[in-house]
């Protein structure tokens, strides 16, 4: 909210400086974001009157003017197209200094002497307009300093309001706050009903009362929109950051800035039969005031006539029904629109207007009639016209309901840390416009006014008392409390340990968006449909991820496009799956490896990382976590059919490991062998509690065997059978050789194993070891059809 300090002081004028005023507003919770002078720094500029204008004898575009400064008449050569006899203008006399330290001296222009300069708004730092000299009102006193006449000793203050303080998006609201802070009564303009002089009223029908609970309209006939907006109004608009357009638009903008109620004026001749407030029809289109054509959605509230839409409600009017210099009859609109109905609609169409900014945050639902009366009075004073009666259509069912909230004195003292005198509390509440409906034994029953939609609970009232009393006046106390240590299960490993493990193995941690490209995700995880976002920030970030791979592969592409050949990334985060109406969030761990296994140097070479490198790193992680994970050959739509493993824990699926499918890799334009893994964090962070035991002092016994077995049999099955029949004293089982060749027959391979036994209390004898060893051999023959290799 940007406003002129002088305009504010017309309403409430505390005896404090500009800086003190801004500090006071900031400490009350309405942060001042900045301020700037309303004009450039200049001196020696007075109100001048052009007495005569003659053509320059040697230049077609110059004029020789006689200008009075109230004391003398001097000759000035001027090239402005709008200079004319009788015009009152800002006149920089000899010796004047304009913004930019530009000094005015006597000069000759094409042989004609010129003693001073007639100034445009841009030359005084008042505007960007430099097409002609600035025209002052006809009653401007000749010789008066322009800075005094225009009251330019002023600053424009920009307040950065939080979304809940929509009541301060007006001079009226800011003045109310300043009045409360300084115990002063604001001097607001008197708003009296304008008497109707004709009986013509606009036809109004509201078909969407839930979106527009209140709508007012009035016809103003025989207006003259060629009349110029008075300088005082144009200046207040300019200092508030609003450009002057024409009298009708200027008045509606002025009332919006003053009262906080957006209004709109339609050309009555462009409205067919009457006004209808409704939701937009499918594929309905509207050309807006800025010339942009938009296709309206069915969730958009529109103002229409009986043939077509003429405005997007609460956002922007249509070009066709807008007023212009030829408009003779106006339909003036004021309404209360439901903030939820309008939320996000302006952004959907790429718009942001002063009206939408206010309606989305909540406008006082009781303000519309006063704002219309104020606008009518101002319009009649500028463009004339004959006002009609105000027609109001309201739905009490859909209008906000009045609220009463109990404020307990003890709760107030507990939260603020200070007991404030009851009389002081009551004075603060009353000055804020809050009604004290009933005095309670332990507090107050407060009635919330319509202009404060942000106050809904007791804590809101406590905040109001605290900020007006002054946060600096509250006592400084140190918070006290007991902090108990959280009990961490020893078997549960922190996620930080997983991160540390991967970082120590040369991985970089990545953090990618939870929003992903639906086209990429469809290739990575076609079995799950992503949850679509209602308002995505872009088309390639429009669904929630069902796998962390989508973001990681996009990161790989980003790095490969920047000549990074060795990429090792991991990420921990959530994936989002929809189950009916419920959205489940699953913590996941995922990683991707591309390029060489080790950084390039003189000893490591350039060996490309393969499936077993990543499998080994995962097995190291599982060992750290104290869990046992099995690897089972399987199929996944995003992974290579022959290089995919499903990860299982106690027979339950916990994740995937594999090489990216060649077709998916081609579609994503990625290079090299891309290895990926993804696991459910909740399934792996809880492991086994370490159980320490004494190291045996007795010798370990080793036996080796080589078996011929089908290539289709996984080593995991061999290990399972061997451990099952090797007895409880087996301490280790290792495969130390694998061989495939023609001598073994097609589809067979040789597998060499070492088995180790050790007893904690005695030396194992030969018969015991022999019995266990033979049991393992017999089981492998019987269960896996293995044969001993001779």
Image (cartoon, helix red, strand yellow):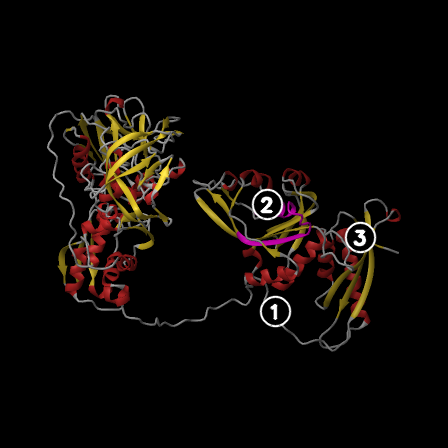
Mark 2: few/some/many CA within 10 Å (<14, 14-19, 20+): some
Occupied quadrant, residue 64: top left
Q: Is the residue 423 above or below the residue 253 in the image?
A: below
Residue located beneath label 1 in the image: 690
Q: State the image coordinates of residue 253 (x, y, percent, origin top left).
A: 26, 38
Number of the front mark, 2 or 3: 2
Is residue 398 visible in this depiction of the protein?
Answer: no
Residue at the spot 16% in from the left edge and 60% down from the top edge: 426
User: How far apart are the two marked residues, 2 and 3, measured between alpha carbons?
Assistant: 46 Å
User: How far apart are the two marked residues, 3 and 1, measured between alpha carbons?
Assistant: 35 Å
Q: State the image coordinates of residue 591 (x, y, percent, origin top left).
A: 62, 52
Residue at the spot 58% in from the left edge and 60% down from the top edge: 499
Given residues 423 and 47, the one toward you in this image is 47
Residue 568: in magenta span: yes
Q: Is the residue 66 above or below the residue 16 in the image?
A: above
Number of the front mark, 3 or 1: 1
Q: State the image coordinates of residue 578 (x, y, percent, origin top left).
A: 48, 43
User: How far apart are the two marked residues, 2 and 1, measured between alpha carbons?
Assistant: 40 Å
Whether residues under marks 2 and 3 lie with C-beta atoms below 8 angstroms apart, the answer is no
Residue located beneath label 2 in the image: 554
Residue located beneath label 3 in the image: 786
- Relative horizontal placement of residue 566, taking residue 246 as reference (left or right): right
Whether residues under marks 3 and 1 lie with C-beta atoms below 8 angstroms apart, the answer is no
Ranked by sequence position, the earlier of labels 2 and 1 is 2
Ranked by sequence position, the earlier of labels 2 and 3 is 2
Mark 1: few/some/many CA within 10 Å (<14, 14-19, 20+): few
- Relative horizontal placement of residue 605, taking residue 310 as reference (left or right): right
Residue 348: in magenta span: no
- Which secondary structure, mark 3? loop
Given residues 206 and 253, the one toward you in this image is 253
Magenta-tinted stretch? 550-573
């Amino acid at each position: 909210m940007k406003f002129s300090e002088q305009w504010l002081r017309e309403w409430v004028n505390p005896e404090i400086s500009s800086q003190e005023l801004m500090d006071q507003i900031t400490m009350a919770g309405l942060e001042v974001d900045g301020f700037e002078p309303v004009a450039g720094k200049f001196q020696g500029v007075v109100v001048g009157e052009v007495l005569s204008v003659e053509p320059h004898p040697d230049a077609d575009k110059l004029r020789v003017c006689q200008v009075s400064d109230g004391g003398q008449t001097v000759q000035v050569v001027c090239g402005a197209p709008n200079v004319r006899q009788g015009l009152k203008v800002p006149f920089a006399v000899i010796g004047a200094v304009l913004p930019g330290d530009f000094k005015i001296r006597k000069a000759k222009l094409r042989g004609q002497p010129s003693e001073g300069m007639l100034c445009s708004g841009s030359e005084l730092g008042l505007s960007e307009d430099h097409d002609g000299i600035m025209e002052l009102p006809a009653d401007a006193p000749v010789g008066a300093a322009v800075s005094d006449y225009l009251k330019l000793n002023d600053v424009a203050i920009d307040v950065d309001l939080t979304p809940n303080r929509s009541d301060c998006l007006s001079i009226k609201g800011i003045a109310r706050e300043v009045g409360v802070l300084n115990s002063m009564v604001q001097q607001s303009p008197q708003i009296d009903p304008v008497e109707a002089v004709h009986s013509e009223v606009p036809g109004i029908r509201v078909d969407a009362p839930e979106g527009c609970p209140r709508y007012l309209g009035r016809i103003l006939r025989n207006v003259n929109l060629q009349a110029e907006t008075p300088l005082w109004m144009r200046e207040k608009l300019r200092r508030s950051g609003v450009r002057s357009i024409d009298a009708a638009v200027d008045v509606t903008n002025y009332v919006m800035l003053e009262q906080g109620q957006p209004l709109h004026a339609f050309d009555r001749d462009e409205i067919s039969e009457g006004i209808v407030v409704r939701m937009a029809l499918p594929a309905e289109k509207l050309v807006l005031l800025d010339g942009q054509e938009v296709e309206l959605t069915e969730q958009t509230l529109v103002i229409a006539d009986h043939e077509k839409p003429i405005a997007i409600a609460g956002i922007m009017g249509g070009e066709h029904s807008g007023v212009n210099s030829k408009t003779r009859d106006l339909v003036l609109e004021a309404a209360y629109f439901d903030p939820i109905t309008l939320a996000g609609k302006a952004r959907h169409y790429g718009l942001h207007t002063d009206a939408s900014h206010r309606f989305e945050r909540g406008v006082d639902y009781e303000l519309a009639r006063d704002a219309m009366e104020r606008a009518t009075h101002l319009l009649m004073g500028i463009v004339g016209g004959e006002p009609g009666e105000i027609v109001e259509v309201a739905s009490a069912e859909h209008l906000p309901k009045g609220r009463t909230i109990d404020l307990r004195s003890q709760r107030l003292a507990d939260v603020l840390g200070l007991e404030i005198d009851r009389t002081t509390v009551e004075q603060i509440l009353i000055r804020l416009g809050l009604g004290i409906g009933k005095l309670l034994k332990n507090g107050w029953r407060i009635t919330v006014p319509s202009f404060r939609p942000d106050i809904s609970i007791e804590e809101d009232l406590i905040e109001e008392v605290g900020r007006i009393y002054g946060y600096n006046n509250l006592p400084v106390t140190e918070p006290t409390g007991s902090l108990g240590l959280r009990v961490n299960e020893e078997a549960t490993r922190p996620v930080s340990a997983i991160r540390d493990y991967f970082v120590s193995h040369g991985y970089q941690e990545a953090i990618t968006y939870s929003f992903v490209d639906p086209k990429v995700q469809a290739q990575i995880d076609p079995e799950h449909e992503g949850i679509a976002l209602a308002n995505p920030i872009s088309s390639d970030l429009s669904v929630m991820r069902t796998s962390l791979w989508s973001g990681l592969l996009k990161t790989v592409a980003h790095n490969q496009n920047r000549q990074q050949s060795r990429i090792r990334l991991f990420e921990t985060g959530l994936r989002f799956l929809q189950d009916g109406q419920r959205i489940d969030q699953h913590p996941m761990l995922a990683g991707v490896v591309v390029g060489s296994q080790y950084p390039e140097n003189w000893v490591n070479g350039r060996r490309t990382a393969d499936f077993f490198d990543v499998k080994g790193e995962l097995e190291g992680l599982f060992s750290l976590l104290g869990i046992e994970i099995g690897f089972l050959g399987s199929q996944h739509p995003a992974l290579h059919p022959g290089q995919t493993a499903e990860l299982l824990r106690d027979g339950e699926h916990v994740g995937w490991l594999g090489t990216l499918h060649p077709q998916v890799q081609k579609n994503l334009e990625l290079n090299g062998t891309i290895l990926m893994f993804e696991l459910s964090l909740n399934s792996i962070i809880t492991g086994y509690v370490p159980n320490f035991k004494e190291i045996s002092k007795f010798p370990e016994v080793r036996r080796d065997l080589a078996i011929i077995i089908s290539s289709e049999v996984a080593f995991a099955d061999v290990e399972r059978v061997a451990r099952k029949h090797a007895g409880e004293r087996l301490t280790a089982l290792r495969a130390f050789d694998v061989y495939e060749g023609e001598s073994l027959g097609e589809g067979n391979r040789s597998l060499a194993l070492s088995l180790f036994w050790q007893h904690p209390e005695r030396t194992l004898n030969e018969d015991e070891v022999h019995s266990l060893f033979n049991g393992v051999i017999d089981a492998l023959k019987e269960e896996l059809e293995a044969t001993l290799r001779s």
